[in-house]
Image: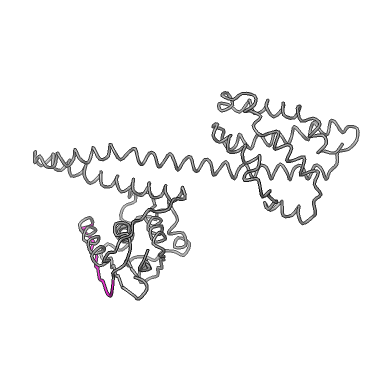
Amino acid sequence: MRLADFILRDMTRILTEWEAFAGTLVPAARRLDSLALRDHALQILQAVARDLSTPQTRHAQREKSMGRAPRLADAPETAAQTHALLRARHGFNINQMVGEYRALRASVLRLWIDACHPDLPDLDDMMRFNEAIDQAVAESVGLFDAQVEQARNLLLGMLGHDMRSPLQTIQATARFLAALNAGEKVSEAAARLIRSGARMNSLLDDLCDFNRTKLGLGINITPTRIDLAQVFGDAVDQLRAAHPAHRIEFAAHGDLLGVWDGLRLQQLLSNLVTNAVTYGAADAPVRVAVTGHDAEVRVAVWNSGPPIDPQTLGQIFDPLRRGQDPHNKNAPGLGLGLYIASEIAKAHHGSIAARSDAAGTEFELCLPRAA
């Protein structure tokens, strides 16, 4: 008996075994009825039977083995993808979902071989069936992973948003205590609270910006006509106050008027300079140079120090990566500063690049005059 015919003939028995196995996947399965436990199993098996009944060339088999199986133009999701989506929403983990396919594969082949006895099963059907199940697993895992990542990003976004209110209360209370002038100990404690609150607020900003990019929303900008000499000059003054032990030099040349988001570009420069202060030589200055050209403005941030190895340099704008701070082995941070700087540059239709050698490390930002 051909395997496609067997699947369609014995669908009820196969689905019963699927449901029995799915029911063992606790705790998620405890909340599901029979229909939910069999979720899209019928459609998955029907798709497998159709695939087995369709002639397949060697080229088509090779394409399928590489994950390039043809898709129906009018089907936004396959049955396997929809199954993965619902399993993720019902609280199954990825190992449990893959386990369903493993159990289905064993169940169908066992029942089919028993039904073929004493004849031998068709080996080509067996190979085609394994290909079809592997394809369904690949489709399910891809969408399951995307669904879990989206849920995680939404959770992080809500967490970052909800933490702002208590943080603002802490900062307001600390400023109130500082204003009371109630003695040196109280003033010092209030100052520590203010600094810690500012640091937490910066981390939340990074987290929320990262979250927007992972949700496909990009960095939000509000371009207006500004003078980068003034905008970056103000930012450098703030950075000097934040890092009094480091020398930060600033130079501006040429026409620096354009249409950009000033606050976002200050954030970008702050991330670059903070990175230079953190990883550069403590006894050498950090140099910021802004130069206006006809169609664009170039911003260079340079620091002295040991060169960055090529592998690290190639991944330096990747999110959630942190270098080893030579001055503070436990420096706080999420490893998002350079990633967010690159995303701000992209939002302005600009670019940012890094190069490093024995002479020092330089980040160069290129901004078109109109974001």
Residue 205 position in % (x across, y down): 33, 48
Residue name at image x 78 percent, y 35 percent: 109
Residue 156 position in % (x across, y down): 41, 41
In the displayed orientation, state which residue is furthest to the right.
Answer: 118
Magenta region includes residue 246: yes
Residue 317 position in % (x across, y down): 43, 58
Q: Is residue 314 left or right of residue 201?
A: right
Residue closest to the eye, 241 or 64: 64
Q: How many marks?
A: 0
Q: Quadrant of residue 146?
A: top right
Q: Quadrant of residue 62?
A: bottom right
Residue 226 position in % (x across, y down): 27, 64
272 versus 205 height, above or below? below
258 versus 264 height, above or below? below
Magenta region includes residue 150: no
Q: Can the viewer see residue 284 in this picture?
A: no
Q: Quadrant of the C terminus?
A: bottom left
Q: Which residues are magenta?
A: 243-255
Q: Can the viewer see residue 211 in this picture?
A: yes
Residue name at image x 68 percent, y 36 percent: 101
